[in-house]
Amino acid sequence: MKYTIAVIPGDGIGPEVTNQAKKALDAVAEVYDHIFLYKEAQMGSCAIDATGNPLPEKTIEICKKADAILFGAIGDPKYDNDPSLRIRPEQGLLRLRKELDLFSNINPVKAYDQLIKNSPLRREIIKGTDILIFRELTAGIYFGKKETSKDGKSAYDVCSYSVDEISRIAHLAFKASQSRKNKVTLIDKSNVLETSKLWRKTVTEIAKQYKNVELEHMYADNAAMKLILNPKKFDVILTENFIGDIISDEASVISGSIGLLASSSIGEDNALFAPVHGTFPEATGKDIANPLASILSAAMMLEHFGLEEEADAIKRAVEKSLDLNISTQDIKGKNKYPAATSKVGDFISDYILNQEDSNINFMNIHAGQSTII
Ligand code: IPM
Ligand code: MN
């Protein structure tokens, strides 16, 4: 099959890691006889530098025409110290979400056995964790009216939600839970916020259509605590935009490395796949960032195309790289001969192409150890 993929490398380590995902996709294309046609587009700080606009029209056009979007990361430290700047890189991503109506951010959090030792949480707490977070992405406080008063002494951000905006993502969450443990936890702040009350009422009503699914309610503050104390208790999490932003980052600690978490942002007609991590400015251009989250985003994209076997091939290669310890320094530690970003990408791609036959060769060649071939 032929697929057109809009590639938005973005800022910071975005381009480096996205290149590794493309290598993995190219290997899949070769083995499974597909054509992936990449259309590169700009967004974020690099787009502001080039055009003055964090989301040029051309990028929107390319994305709308593509079968899916592969995105890297967005942001630049030069914007961080001046919150008064009116044009900011992040606006590009927010506008793209709105423009393409990517209303559902789906974020799987799994504890990888090989990485549990890297988590600051104890093994017995996180082992076996498997959570799927559904974060609403195109409404709420992110997109409400916002203003700072003329004298700069007050400001507001309006949070609003409609029943329709809540319902469409709620249905996705309930449906997903049916092929999992049949449990949905709605996280809100309905003891305080009107929008949360609407979420609770709407989702409780929708739950009646999913009789085999248990709906649990949890306040956001309590959820933040439970997620760390007992993450195994969660199956599907459903929540609004701002709470979901925070909960997703918190949950990323559980996996043992944020460098492995991929997420998808899905709408009716479009879908974007990206690592959960950000631009990692300290690592930019050094070939040391972990490319696995980007590579796993590519696998999620293949699943979205219905190419399960192909996605599995990428996931198996990622598992193998972890088993063989062909990993970047965030996993392996600086002093233990970490592999470069590009080398991890080479290994994943070689493994997809050659499978088990050449394990030992890979290990020797790519880890830079003495070669016994
Ligand atoms: C995310 C990011 C974005 C968000 C930023 C870059 C605007 O943190 O995708 O979670 O807050 O949604
Ligand atoms: Mn975030």
Image (cartoon, rainbow, N blue to C red):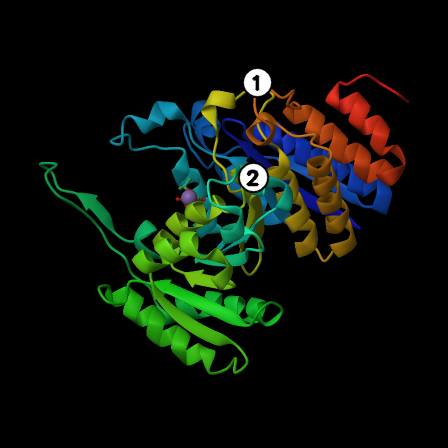
Q: Residue at x 44, y 74 (%)?
A: 215
Which one is in front, 261 or 163?
261
In the rendered image, the vertical position of residue 360 relative to residue 125, given as above or below: above
Q: For disc 2, does the CB lie below 8 Å from ligand 2?
A: no
Q: Position of residue 202 (x, y in %)?
A: 37, 75
In contact (CB < 8 Å): disc 1 and disc 2: no
Indicate which quadrant contains ligand 2: top left
Helix, strand or loop status at disc 2: helix
- In the image, what residue type sits under mark 1? Lys
Left or right: 314 in relation to 116: right
The answer to whether residue 356 is seen in the rendering is: yes
Q: Nearer the viewer, mark 1 or mark 2?
A: 2
**In the image, which disc is placed on residue 117?**
2
Which one is in front, 244 or 70?
244
The quarter of the displayed image where residue 194 is located:
bottom left
Residue tagged 1:
286
Q: Residue at x 56, y 68 (%)?
A: 177
Report the quarter where the C terminus lies.
top right
Helix, strand or loop status at disc 1: loop
Q: Position of residue 120 (x, y in %)?
A: 46, 40
Circle 1 packing at 10 Å, graded few (<14), some (14-19), many (20+), is few
